[in-house]
Image (spheres, rainbow, N blue to C red):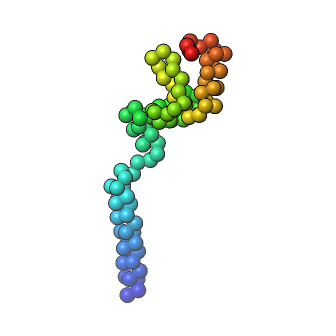
Amino acid sequence: MWKWLILAAAAYILYRLFANDLLKKKKDGEKTEAEETARKVQAGEMVKDPECGVYVSADAEVTVRDGEKVYRFCSYDCRDKFLQRLKEGGGRLSS
Ligand SMILES: [Zn+2]
């Protein structure tokens, strides 16, 4: 008798775990942060900071314009390093 009760309880717990998991997946598409970032990059909502490689919002305030191209940075630190690197490397950046 007890055996069956325990088995039933275990089955019920497993079922609940599984059901919760499915519900969660349905709710937010079970997207990882990386997938979400990749989607935003594809949609043009996020761009890569060319200095540190971090993805920043496409309307980030820290930018450097190089002709047609606009670089966006996560911080002024990164921007300064980027500009410094261009200068040292003889970059074609026109300020
Ligand atoms: Zn950065």
Q: Position of residue 11 (x, y in %)?
A: 37, 73
Where, quadrant-wise, is the C terminus in this rendering? top right
Residue sitting at x 47%, y 20%: 69
The correct choice, above or below, for 45 with respect to 28 in the image is: above
Residue sitting at x 37%, y 87%: 1
The correct choice, above or below, for 45 with respect to 84 in the image is: below
**Extreme-bottom residue of the structure:** 1
Q: Tell which of 62 and 45 is nearer to you.
A: 62
Residue sitting at x 41%, y 80%: 6
Q: Tell which of 94 and 18 is nearer to you.
A: 94
Q: Position of residue 68 (x, y in %)?
A: 45, 17
Residue sitting at x 56%, y 34%: 74
> Is 46 placed left or right of 8 in the picture?
right
> Is 75 placed left or right of 69 in the picture?
right
> Image quadrant of residue 58?
top left
Answer whether residue 14 is visible to the viewer in this image.
yes
